[in-house]
Amino acid sequence: MATQAPPLDEVVGRRPEVILWWMSGEHNLPQPWLHMEERFIHRYFSEQPFFDWTTKNGLLLSHARNNREAFDIVHNRQTFEANLRKNPGIEYMIAGEPQQIPGAPLGEKNGMWVIRKQDRLREPKTSDQHNPYPSTQTLATYYIVGENVYQAPSVADVVGNRVLSAATHLSKFFDKAASLPSFSPTTGHTYLPQQAKPTGTASTAGSPARSREGSVAPGVDSQSLRSGSLAPESQSGGAAASTNAQDARLLAQSLQMAIQFGDEYMDENPILGEPGAFKFTSSTAAVKKRKADEEAAVFAAAKAKERKEAAVSRPISPKPEKAVSPPAVFTEAKAGHSAVEKQKKDEKKRRRKSRPNAQSPTTPASATSATGVSTSLPRDFIIVQTAKAAHQRNLSDQYTMRSTLEAQKRTAKALFHALNTKDIDGIIGVRTPECTHTVKPKTMGAEVRTNGQHGAWLEQAMPLFGGFSMTILREVYDAEKHECAVHVTTKSGAMPVGVGVYESEFMMFLHFTEDGTQITSAVEMVDSAYSLEFLEGVQRWKALRAWVQ
C-alpha cells in the first residue's frame, strides 16, 4: 500500500542543483548572475513541488523550453509579470521582496521573497492596456527564505489546529477530573487521591485529635491511640471494626449537625472583611427576627387567601325570618312604659318619612329581591371578578394587536415584492381607493399623487430601469398607530446611455387600515440632490431621443 504524501504546507522545497545551473552561466543570460536574484525567482519556484504547470506561468515556461525569445521573457521579472497581467486566469506573482535588516549595514537584506498564487478575474475589465484585469482573488501564499521554499498555512488550518489542541486537552482534563471526587463519612468530599497513613508507632503528628477523645474501645493503650487506631495492632480484626465504629460515630455527628444547623445559609448572614478580620453582617438575633417576620408575612398572606376563597365559594343564603316571641305578661308599669316607647317610635318614623332617601346607620344598604332574600355580593368576590374581566380584555387586546402587526408585515412585504417585480397592478392592489403617494422633501416639487396618477407615473418610469431591485435594510412597525417606517436601498441594472446607473437609498413611511390589510397613504423621503440630478439626466436623454427621432 502506497504511503500518503504529506500536506504541502508541511513540505520544505529546496533545489540546490537548479541554483548551481543558474550560477554556472549555461543559460547564456547577461551577467551578473547573483544568488537568488529577481530574474531567477520565478524559474526557481517553478522547480518546486508547489508549482502548478497548468497556470499561466506554467504555459509560458513550457513555451520557453523551445523558444529563445520566450526564454528571455520568463527570466526578466518585469516583462514576465507584465505579460501575466494582460490575461485573466491563475498565476504566480511576486508579492514581497527582501527588506533591509534594521540596524544592519546598508544593503544587507533579510533574503525573503513572498510569492502569491492568485486568480485574475475577468470582471471588471478596464481600459488600462497594462493592467486590464485589476481584480484578483488570492488562492495561496508561499515564501522563500534562503534556498528553502515554504507554503503558508491557511487561516482555517491554523484555527482548526488550535481548536483541536484545546479540545484534546479539555477531553483529557474531564477524564482526569471525573475520577477525582469521592465521599466517605470519615473525610467527607475529597477531590484528590487519598494518601495511605503510616501504621508505625513513631508518627503521632498525623493522628486526629478526636481519635483520642471519642475512643469507644476499652483497654486501648496510649500508643495505639497516638497511631490513630482504636485497638492494638495485635488484634487482627479489631482495626476494621474500630474504623466502622468511628465512621458510624462521625455519621451520627454529621446528621446531628445537619438537624441543628440545616436551616442556616451563608446568604442569610453574609461575611464581611478580609482574611484574619472576618465578621458577620448581622447578629444571630437579627437574623432570627428577620426570618420570623418573613414567616409571619407568609402566614398572613395564606390566611388572607383562605378568607378570599371562602368568601367566593360561600353560597348566598336567605335571610332567616325572625322568630315570633310569645306575648309578654301585661302589667300597668309595662303598659305605661310601652306607651312611651310607642310614642318615641312613631316620632322616629315621622322624621324618617320626611327624608325619603335616608338610611339607618346600623343597617347598610343592600339589594333585596322580591322574596326578601339579600343579593349583595362580598367585596372580595367583586374585586376578583373585575380583575379577571380586565385580564381577559387585556389578553384580547394583545391578540388583536399581534394579528394586526402580522397583517401589516404581510401587506408591506407584498408591496415591496410588487416593486421588485415591476408589478404595477400588485403595487396599486395593496392600496385603498383613497390612498395617496407623496415624495418628499419639498425640494422635489412632487405633488400628492392618487392611485391613478401614481400608476401612470410607474408605467412611464418602470421601462427605464433594467434589473431594478430594492433591498430592505430595516423596518419598524407600530401596530397601535397602524404605521411603519422602512429603510430601503435601490439599484438598477442597464440604463439608457448618458443616464447612468441608478443607485440610492430612501425611507418609506406607510399608514395602514385598522386591520392592516391595505395601505391608506405612502410617503417617500428620498435623497433630493441625487434624485434631481438623476431626473435631469433622464430629461436630457428624452430630449436627445426626441431630436433623433
Image (tube, rainbow, N blue to C red):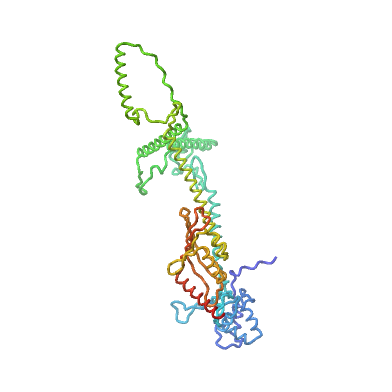
Viewer-proximal residue among 127 and 172: 127
**Left or right side of 292 for 347:** left
Residue 33 percent location from the top left of the image: 56, 85
Residue 196 percent location from the top left of the image: 51, 45
Res 495 quadrant in image: bottom right
Is residue 513 visible in this depiction of the protein?
yes
| Numbered disc total | 0
Q: Is residue 493 above or below residue 288?
A: below
Res 142 quadrant in image: bottom right
Viewer-proximal residue among 382 and 249: 382
**Left or right side of 118 for 330:** left
Residue 70 percent location from the top left of the image: 62, 85
Is residue 36 visible in this depiction of the protein?
no
Q: Quadrant of the C terminus?
A: bottom right
Viewer-proximal residue among 444 and 409: 444
Residue 171 percent location from the top left of the image: 55, 55
Q: Quadrant of the N terminus?
A: bottom right
The furthest residue to the right = 1
Q: Is residue 145 above or below residue 159?
A: below
